[in-house]
Amino acid sequence: MMIKVMYKDGSTHLVSPRFLDRLLSSDEIFAFRRSSGWVVVSRDRLRENDEGNGYTGQERRLKH
């Protein structure tokens, strides 16, 4: 699954989920697209990390 991202200069690209994490960590993107719409990094809630997120159910995401 590729994720559409918008860089701070307005350009858009498709990236892998792993690369999205890298872009978020390095503060290189303005927004990325979820199924519910665009997520603006400086405004919208982002997941922190997989550990300590309060979810106690079974992990269903694929680990790569």
Image (spheres, rainbow, N blue to C red):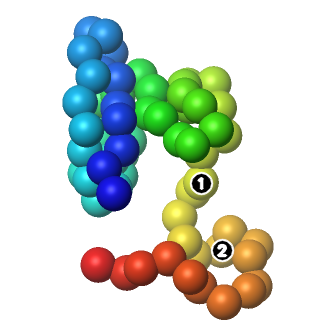
Residue 18 horizontal side relative to residue 56, left or right: left
Residue drawn at (63%, 25%) of the image:
43
Badge 1 element = loop
- Front residue of 20 and 12: 12
Q: Position of residue 49 (x, y in %)?
A: 53, 64
Q: Position of residue 41 (x, y in %)?
A: 52, 30
On screen, residue 49 above or below 35: below
Q: Which mark is residue 52?
A: 2
Quarter residue 35 falls in: top right
Q: Amino acid at mark 2?
A: Gly
Quarter of the image containing the N terminus?
Answer: bottom left
Q: Please give the count of numbered marks on the rendered protein.
A: 2
Q: Earlier in the sequence, mark 2 or mark 1?
A: 1
Q: Nearer the viewer, residue 14 or 18?
A: 14
Residue 22: in sight, yes or no? Answer: no
Visible in this render: residue 1? yes
Question: Do callouts 2 and 1 mark residues in contact (Cβ within 8 Å)?
Answer: no
Mark number displayed over residue 47: 1
Q: Nearer the viewer, mark 2 or mark 1?
A: 1
Q: Image point 41% across, 22% down: which residue?
A: 30
Whether residue 24 is situated above or below residue 9 in the rendered picture: below
Q: Real-space Cα distance between discs 2 and 1?
A: 11 Å
Q: Residues within 10 Å of mark 1 (few under 14, many from 20)?
A: few
Q: Is residue 54 left or right of residue 60?
A: right
Q: Quarter holding the C terminus?
A: bottom left
Which amino acid does the dot numbered 1 rest on?
A: Arg
Percent across and percent down for residue 26 are: 30, 39
Image location (x, y in percent) of residue 2 = 31, 50
In the picture, residue 44 is in which quadrant? top right
Q: Residue furthest top?
A: 9
Q: Foreground residue, 30 or 35?
A: 35
